[in-house]
Amino acid sequence: MMDHEVEWLEAQKIETSVDLLAAAKQQLLFLAAVDRNRWLYDGPALESAIYRYNACWLPLLAKHSESSVTEGPLVPPLDCEWIWHCHRLNPVRYKTDCEQFYGRVLDVSGVVSSVNGNCKLKTEELWKKLYPEVPYDLDLDNLVSDKSSHPEKCTKYDLVSAVKRQSPFYYQVSRSYVSSDVFLREAVARYKGFLYLIKKNRERSLKRFCVPTYDVDLIWHTHQLHPVAYCNDLEKLIGKVLEHDDTDSDRGKGKKLDTGFSNTTAQWEETFGRRYWKAGAMYRGSTPAPVTSSPYVSDVLVKEPTSKEEFQSLIQVPDVEVVEVLLEIIEVRNIPDGHKGKLSVVFSKTQPDSLFDAERRLTILSEAGEKQVAFFQCEPTGELRFQLVSSSPSKIPVAREPKSLGFASLSLEDFFSSVITQLSVEKWLELTPNKGSKTDPKPISLRVAVSFTPPTRCPSVLHMVQSRPSCKGSCFFPIIRKSSHAKSSTHVVDETQTEVISLQMSDGATLKGDHTAQRQVIGVTDSGETRVLAEYTGTFWSLLDSKWLLKHTNVDNPLFELLGTRVVKILSGRKLDYEPKHCAKRRTDEDFMTLVEFSKQHPYGKAVGLLDLKFGSIEAEENWLVLPGIVSAFILNTLLKRGGSNGFEATTKVAQQESLKSNGLKEESKETKLVATVENKVKGNTTNRQTVAAIIAPEKGSGCGGGVCSGECGNMVKAAMASGCGGGCSGECGDMVKAANASSCGGGCSGECGDMVKAAKASSCGGGCSGECGDMVKAAKASSCGGGCSGECGDMVKAANASSCGGGCSGECGDMVKAAKASSCGGGCSGECGDMVKAAKASGCGGGCSGECGDMVKAAKASGCGGGCSGECGDMVKAA
């Protein structure tokens, strides 16, 4: 068999008579234009477009292809071009229809897309002359789709179904980096590799259903949209016109798409020695539900942005770039004796960032025999660090620390210099032995495959942190530090815990009978400068010296509008790109509001921000939204939590919840204690960005879960035959490694359970584990993480039979070591218990330890930290 690289070079010799990179960019622009006119996807307008395509466009194109019937290029109307687009994506049927009705394949030569500018005047004149009763642009008020009067030359191909199959495609390729040159160059190269596999199969008389990734499919579509070139190129390559079968959409296990994709992956990697899965090229999930069925036409006079916004300097949010990463550990060589079959790789970043700041674990393909891929987002800085570890089995029911066999690293910055030349690499990395280890003449090496997306702007995530003297331990907003401005200031911090501004709601003139009337939002900078950021006028809030206004719409959805230089509607729940996907029991949508911008570019709405009412945070996709967004979030958070005091009436279910108190705080519960901590672990709950480290299940895993697991369980590694993510898994369970036959993530696991390693037959993550349980190691048969563990339990080591993390442990229990039979972290430990060491049978951290107890040493049999200790429990040492 030829060397992998020789095979790849042979594939790259495949010639196409189309500039596929430039044509792919053109296709993306066209698909975006169609998506702004979604009446073309279904209904009477689609029927009318199909009629016009058959009766007008194809005959006109046929005349033009015989002899030019107009000066300059021919420009199809948008609706006709869309139907033509979908017809051509069945290249065999399109060729047959054209030859039947016109004697030849009607090509794109001499035709320019309708999105290419103002060159359609000549075509409009010709259209009017040939079809005087049919307007050039589709008239939505006078649709023509008389089925009883079919054109003389009309395909019997079901174009309605073809359109419905192609409509969801744009969502899969609509991310901004897809149109970048470096991404498309690699896509063209991979498309040639895809054609090479098909060629090899035909030469071997193998009937295989090859399934493309979305980058390859984009280029394949691009090629088909040039029908003459496509027919000629494919007949030259494989002796026939390659069919494009888009009729299968069932992605279920064992179905045609699933088995075809698995087989294509295997053949690709065997042939070329490089990975088929690629960052930015995989299935994104189904298209989010639209927020409106008709395009938005604004009746609001949008204010022009001023050349210099005086408020911009008030908030300094750093511009951060983000890349998506797809990582797989392929092989290990020169393994020391006694370690084969026990190896895995722990990976991290040498410069942790707000997106990726933990260690994650992956198995090795050559060792495990199953494909496991990590998907995560991070900043394109520093290095990826790989540690090869060996886990030895133990007869003692206590987890052993894995043995480290060495380290290796891969620089991210080498990829993301001023000019990005490649987005994927697969290479051997030689491991550096641990200090004190003997140098082996044959060093251990790891084969690592990693791909990236081009960098894009990372959304700004800001958290509102309330400082309130009367709030002990866990408040609705977490305490970062004491306020120097007022008794009830709200600090706005970024994901590095840097305060960007402090906000206060000040009392204005009290209305008669309304003793909670508040009129202004005051901003206080670090320098002590005070500015009025918003004022209530009696009917709406005026923001930033009247540059924006926030008003209630008096309808259920949208609830509010933010109007200024943009038109933004604030909708209840998580919408569009924030719509929950994958496998997690959804947090109630009452906790969220989505900020959706409407414009000519996005008439059906574009999600530009997400407000999390429960945890007091806002995610802003673009810089212009940061300041008006955080001021609006503060107003809505404050007033809705008070049940609609001055400013807006209590019209939402959120405002009507019985647990809302007049001071704006929520009753403490397991869930509300999950609020942002000093370590800033809230991003898994406050945003719907792709999880920090996604690990895709191996092919034999049965599914994400049986039970009611319906939201985003994160990216887990599931062993073959593992039953599911769990019945009731409702948060981001993180990157768990579950042994075969392990029953589930847990019944009620609703937070980020972190990087847990569970032994076979361990029952669950825990019944009610709703926080970040951290990096726990649980021995076989340990019952759970804990019945109610809702904070950050840290890096705990629990012996077999230990009952739980604790019944109500809701703060940061730190790095505790608990002996067997220890009852819990504490019966109400809600602050930061620090780094405690508890002996066996010690009763607890304390019966109400919620504040700062300091560094105490307690004698044996002492009952607790204290019955009302309300500080930080610090680093206590308790005797047995």
Image (cartoon, helix red, strand yellow):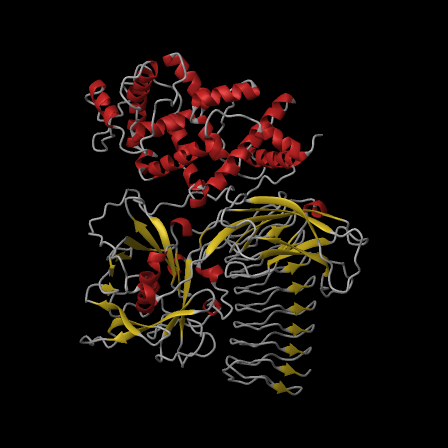
Residue 675 position (above or below residue 92): below
Residue 247 in view? no
Task: Give 729 or 245, whichever is nearer the viewer.
Answer: 245
Q: Is residue 624 above or below residue 485?
A: above
Using residue 750 as the reference point, say whether residue 651 is left or right of it.
Answer: left
Extreme residue in the top direction: 103
Observer able to see residue 723: yes
The percent position of residue 525, horizontal first and vertical second, equals: 35, 73
Q: On the rendered image, what quadrant is the N terminus found in?
A: top right
Which quadrant would residue 68 be assigned to in this image? Answer: top left
Tell me where residue 77 appears, x and y as whole percent: 29, 28
**Residue 370 horizontal/vertical position (percent):** 66, 44
Q: Residue at x 43, y 25 (%)?
A: 226
Quarter occupied by residue 761: bottom right
Query: Which residue is at 41% across, 25% downward?
Result: 88
Is 782 drawn above or below residue 161 in the view shown?
below
In front: 805, or 135?
Answer: 135
Measured from the top left, where is residue 490 in percent x and y?
37, 72
